[in-house]
Structures are given as structure tokens and as C-alpha cells.
Amino acid sequence: MGGRLYAVVVKELWAILRDPRARIILVVPPLFQLFVFGFASTLEVRNFDIGVYNRDGGASSREFIERLGGSPNVGRIVPIGSPGEARDAIDGRSVIAVVTFDQEFSANVAARRAAVIQAVFDGRRSNAAQIVSGYLERIAADMGADIAAKPTGVSAPPRSQSIVANWFNSNLDYLWFTMPGLVVVISMVSGLAVTAQSVARERELGTFDQLMVSPLRVYEILAGKMVPPLLVGVVNATVYVLLIPTVFGVPLTGSLPLFYCALVFYLLALIGVGILVSVLSQTQQQAFLGAFLVMVPAILLSGYASPVDNMPGWLQVVAQGNPARHFLVVSEGVFLKAMPAAGILANTWPLMVIAAVTLGASTVLFRSRME
Amino acid sequence: MSRAFDGQRFRAMLLKESLQILRDPSTFLIAFVLPLIMLFLFGYAVSLDPTRTRIGLALQDSGAQALSLASAFERSRWFEVTGRRDVETLKRELTAGRIRGFVVIPQDFGRRFATPGDVAAIQIVADGSLPNTASFIGAYAEGVRATWAAGEGAERGIVARQPVEIAQRFWFNPELASHFFLIPGSIAIVMTMIGTLLTALVVAREWERGTMEAIMATPVGMPEFLATKVIPYFLLGLGSMTLCALLAIFLFGVPFRGSPLALLALASAFLVPALGQGLLISAVTRNQFVASQIALISAFLPAMMLSGFLFEIASMPTVIRGLTYIVPARYLIPSLQSVFLVGDLWGLFLRNIAVLLGFGALFFTLAIRATHRRIA
């Protein structure tokens, strides 16, 4: 029986690795994605061009503009000559915001009257606009504090303050979040793609019937189907674990054995879902589209694209059934947080449950297809 | 072999291709079910708007000042304070991800606050493994403190006035709802799926099965043949776009300030490169698995990640920013967001339409050449 299982595994490995292009597909795109999407998927705001309509021209407005231009978040300061020009610049997306100083701005600051800056933002990009707006507020507050601190005033010193510390990623480097997250996302894309087509391809090519009349047991056939995606997943993840700390400089603080333990259950959960899709499909095309139908929501509900905390409560419950949501916590935890075994286990047992349910369901369905 | 265009033959071929698509259940899956799921997810699940974030609170001072600051945090609409605990517990909770940050009000807070010339500091700790949430916590927790401090000052007759104020207005989307721009953007993703993914997959299967060669052996000319392959998917793409737009407006309440004509023109222009890319991938790979993976990697994922849909292009490193210029969705998404939220900006639209058609011409030329080579 051990010999039979071995033979099935060899057959399944050949089925995937025989085609040279498929071999390339298994290795090159995951690496490409790591590099390109790793750098692309940032919610940081940098290099944003801001329009300035300065009707004042005095010292205070010049100082504000100088502070604005000195920020790493701001790309270019674009001079604007009229309200119409401001409108066009925002409509055409050449700037994200236009800041307007009225004629009395510097005079008001000098006289210590309320000096108001008008700022208009492009609401089409509300996330970035909010961050830029927070940035403008900070400059205004800093300038205000400096003005208030000048000796002429009767300013009171601050009596309380906040000291902000960001643990696990003190500079809030977005790459530190993206990289461990991409391990989860890319493993899912390649794992599901390989598994979903395995049974469906046999059915489309007609070799499914041959498999059925062979002396193989159902669990042997399924075990054979599970090995290649498991191997591909572990090999790819190992490449990431090597590249991420060395090339991208993201720390790997936690325990690698625990990471691999959770990874295997994550892959088993994905394989369970993939085989389920495959068993339910008649053709490769349906299998691929089915896998896609699972993949897109799974990525969007994983916490990678946007925080799980922002979702409505009932969707957070739905997301509990998503293996990526649990493994993302493990991956971020092992890379950045030196997560202890208890924390990893708390996110691994849901993976075990998902794997058991999907693999169990696949076996039942597979058996019913045989009869 | 006749290469001349034959209207009757063209209609017959078109009918054959259309029926073939309509009979395939997976067509409905990707053209109507998947868009619904996508729209739904972008409407409800994916939100870049911060909601109440769970934080912990360590209150080490039992004075009146400290208690009033603690209750300011508990009352804040930005935070859900999970209870007052000691710092060790909070550290464990933060590592486990059960809270996203915590605030420490130290023992000497009240004393230092009352001492003239001294500064009472609170500590705000945020979970940096979620950088976006962390910067939000840092900013808003400081905001809670500042508001509280201003209130305390006011009670003592010291009015803290901001010398420089900023009056802010957000055009087009004053509610700052992220689904107002995510939903129009997701229409571009849906059209990429139909145009490139589905086309690549279906046509690759024809190559795999050899039915492509069979048709090539008939007197049908190449452009005519490609047109019959592409037109049904073009219509399917527009149908799906219409469904999405109607749902966006009537179900999700996204404003539609432009004209249907502009939307139609933009969608049609985008489908040209999308379909061309699908045909090109299928003609080059002729294998369903490889075609599906290449379509995923060269069309779907870039449309999600490199188009400005989820992530701002300006914030990307220069090399990646350069790469975004060859992603067709990059030229559609700003126009789609504008046609919904702003109105008809024909200057912007026409520029983008021209670029999209340019990409389309390139992809179709390459697809025709790849097909010729296969036949030879």
C-alpha cells in the first residue's frame, strides 16, 4: 500500500512538473509578485502634489509653504493663479489639494487675529486626502505653537503631552506589513490554482475513469493530489522566508518551526478548498473560475487589503471561515511580533478545523462521484 | 481561399460564438455572479475608513485629572476601550492582536499636571505591524488628549486659541466614504476579468482542443474571425458593466454625476485592450492552465494593485510607478471615479480613451501576428 501511495505521488508530481511552462509558472510569478506588489501595495502617502493659490504673498504664507514643501509626503508645490485654475487642477487630478491664502493672511497672523487657510481636497481619493489634511493640520498647529511661543504673548506652556510609540515596527514601515502579508496571499493564489485544476483536469482529459478503475483507494488518490501543492507551497514559502529578511530587511523575530507548523495547516486548508472546487467542477475552466471565485473574497476578507476591524461585525464572523485571515495573523506575528506559541496556536486550530472540514467534504463528494 | 468579407457568414459565425458563450454556465458565473460578489465586498467588506478601534487603557493614577482623561478615551467615538488593565496584560493582548494599541496614564500624571511648569505625559502604544491602523491610533489618541486638555484649560479660564486655522472642504465626496471610489474602481476590475481572464481561458481551450485550427482551415479571414470571437465578449463586458453601474447607483448610493454616454465610451475603450490582451495570451500559450495563470498575473493582479484602485500610485517607488504606465486599468480608474463623483471631464476622458485605444491596437496587432505564426 505504501508503494501505491508512492506511485500516486510520483504520478501527480509529474502531472504538474512535466510541462516546462507550468514549471516556470510555479516559481517565477510568485517571486515577481513579491517584488512588484510588495513595493506597490502601500497605504502610505508620499509624493503628493499640492496646489497653492497664494493671494497673500506675505512672510507667514511663505513660511507655511516652505514647511509644506519640506515634507516627505509632499511631492511638488504647484502655484495656482485663480480659483478656476484650482478647479481644473483638482478635476484633472494633477494635485490632490489646493491651499488658498487670502490677502490678509500674513497681516492677520502678525496682528494675532484668527488667520484662516482654505484647503480643498480631491474626495475621489478620500483616504489619501484625509492623510494630507491631517498633515496640513499638523503644520498649522506647529506654526501656531511657534507664533504663540514668541515672547510678546502671554502663552502658557503645555501642561500635558502624548508620547507615541509604535511597537513591532517603530517607523511604521509599510513594507514590514506587506511582506509577511504577501506570503499569505501569494501562497493562496498558487496553492488554489494548482489544486483546483487537479481533479478537473483528469475529468476533462478522461483519465479520471482510469483512476477510478485502478486499485487505488479514495484516500490514496486524494493524498496523491495533496502532495504537489503542499510541496510547491512549502518551497515557495521557504524562498520568501529567506528573501524577506535578507533582501527587504523585514525582521524575522518569531519561531520558524512554529511558522512552518502553521503553514502546513494553512496549505492543507487551502488544498481542501481547492480539491472541493475541483471535485465540483466538470471542466478545467470551471475549476479555474471556481477557484477565482473563492480567491478574490478570501484575499479581500483576509485583512491584507483593509483591516478586518473595519468590516461590519457579521462579516468579521464570516471571515473566520477564511484560512488567509488566520494565517495572516500568524505570519505578521512570527515576522514582527515574536509571537509566542499560545498566540500561534490560537490562530492555527481554526486552520485545522477548516482543513478537516474541507478535506472531509472532498472525500465524501469524491466517493459519491465514483459510484 | 476567399478572404473577402461575407456578411452572412459573419452573422452565422457571430451567432455560433454567442450561443457557445451563453450555453456555458461559467460565463454567467464570471459575468454576473462574480461582479455581484466583488461589488458587495467593495461596498461592505473593504473599507479604508477607520471605525472604532479596540484599545486598552492602563490607569496608574487614581486622581481626578487622570480619571477624567480616562473617561475622555472611553467616551471617544474613535476608540473602543476594552477595560482598564495593567501594562503586562496589555502587552500580551497587543502581541496576540486582541487590541490594536493602549494608552498608559502614569502614576504621577495628576501631580505633574497640577505643578506649574511641569508637563504630564501619557504614553500611547500602537501595534506597528498594522501601520495604517497604528498611525490612526497615534493621531486620534493625541487628538483625544488635546481636546481634553483644551477642555481643562477652558475650565480654568485659559482659552487655547489656534492662531492658524485650516478650513477644509472635500470636494466630490464630502462624507469621505471610501466605497464611493472603490465601487467605481471595481467596475474596471470586473471588466478586466471578463475581457482578459475569461477570453484568455476560453480561447486557450479552443487551441488546446484543436477547434481553433479547424476554424482556421475554413475560408474565414483573420480579422473577421477575431471579430466574431471578440464581439460577444465585448457585449458581455458592457452588460456586466451596466449591471455594476446600476447596482452602484441604486443599491450602494454612489452618486452618478456624469453622463451614461461618457461611461459607455470609457467602458468600450477599456474593453478593446482587455480583449486584445486576452486573445494574445491565449494565442501565445494555447494551454488553459498557463493562460489562466498569465492572465491572472498580467491583467487581474496589476489591475488590483498597480492601477491606483487600492493603492495610490504616487506613493509607490519610482520603478513600480514606471511599471504602472503599462497597466491599462490605470487609465480607466481615474476616469471611472470622475464620471461617478465629478461629472463629464471630457479632457481627462479623451486623453485616457486615446491611450486605451493605443494599447488595444498594440495588443490586437500582436495577437494577430501570434495567431498567424501558430497556423504557419
Image (tube, rainbow, N blue to C red):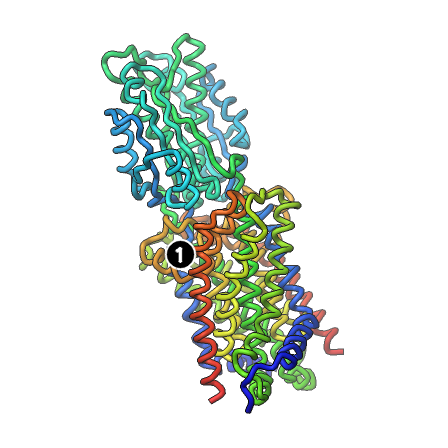
Residue A343 visible in the displayed image:
no
- Count all numbered tags in the image, as a single digit: 1
Residue A350, relative to residue A210: is it above or below? Answer: above
Q: Residue furthest bottom?
A: B1
Q: Position of residue B110 (x, y in %)?
A: 41, 16
Residue B143, relative to residue A362: is it above or below? Answer: above
Q: Position of residue B332 (x, y in %)?
A: 48, 55
Q: Secondary structure at mark 1?
A: helix
Q: Which residue is mark 1?
A: A38
At 57% from the left and 84% from the top, the residue drawn is: B220
Q: Which quadrant: the N terminus of chain B? A: bottom right
- Left or right of A113, for residue A20: right
Residue A118, relative to residue A357: is it above or below? Answer: above
At 24% from the left and 12% from the top, the residue drawn is: A152
Answer with the quarter of the image where residue A100 lies.
top left
At 31% from the left and 18% from the top, the residue drawn is: A108
Q: Position of residue A50 (x, y in %)?
A: 34, 39
- Left or right of A103, for residue B134: right
Answer with the quarter of the image where residue B369 lies.
bottom left
Residue A149 visible in the displayed image:
yes
Q: Nearer the viewer, residue A225 or B162?
A: B162
For mark 1, does the 10 Å Cα neighbourhood hold few (<14), some (14 to 19), or many (20 or more) residues?
A: many
The chain under label 1 reads A
Q: Residue furthest top?
A: B157
Q: Label 1 is placed on what type of residue?
A: Gly
Q: Nearer the viewer, residue B42 or A315?
A: B42
Q: Nearer the viewer, residue A142 or B339?
A: B339
Q: Position of residue B323 (x, y in %)?
A: 37, 60
